[in-house]
Image (cartoon, helix red, strand yellow):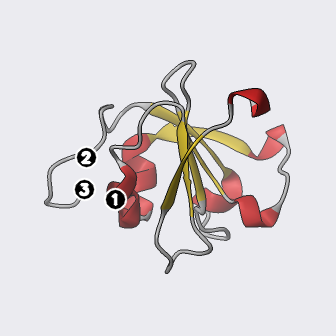
Amino acid sequence: MPSQAWPFPDPPNAATITTRKIMSGEHAIDYVAHDESDGGWQFLNQSAGAWSPNEAMLVSLGQVVSMDSSLNEIGDLPLGWHASRKGKSHRWTRTKSDQENR
């Protein structure tokens, strides 16, 4: 973990959802959702398009953050919000998630 304070409200061992391609380094994380309904986190790649449930992985929050330290910038993302970016070198944009799309 980075030497800075842990910015997430959940502990590093909290379960999160991501994909095999993100964990293998094939895809970068460009979309993060902090679910209002259960407080869960999703770390995805929206530019790759739809993904199948077979590609889903349940990993710890700490594992994902250790792969991409820029996620520390959005550790305070409120429940019911998502953050996106055009690519790993771009800044995160925060948006309140639309209730109708969930």
The x, y position of residue 97, in whole percent, is: 62, 38
Kindly check if marks 2 and 1 are in contact, taking CB atoms under 8 A apart as contact: yes
Kindly check if marks 1 and 3 are in contact, taking CB atoms under 8 A apart as contact: no
34 relative to 70, above or below:
above
Q: Which residue is drawn at 62% across and 60% down?
A: 22
Residue 1: which quarter of the image?
Answer: bottom left
Q: Which of marks 1 and 3 is nearer the N terminus?
A: 3
The x, y position of residue 41, in whole percent, is: 52, 37
- Which amino acid is tagged 2? Pro
Q: In this view, does 29 lie to the left or right of 15?
A: right
- What mark, if any, has residue 82 been given in the picture? none
Between the residue at mark 2 and the residue at mark 1, the CA separation in whole angstroms equals 8 Å
Mark 1 surroundings: few (<14), some (14-19) or many (≥20) residues within 10 A:
few
Q: Name the residue under label 1.
A: 73
Viewer-nearest residue: 38 or 62: 38
Find numbered disc 2 in the image and state the secondary structure of the residue it sits on. Answer: loop
Q: Which of marks 2 and 1 is nearer the N terminus?
A: 2
Q: Which of marks 3 and 2 is in front?
A: 2
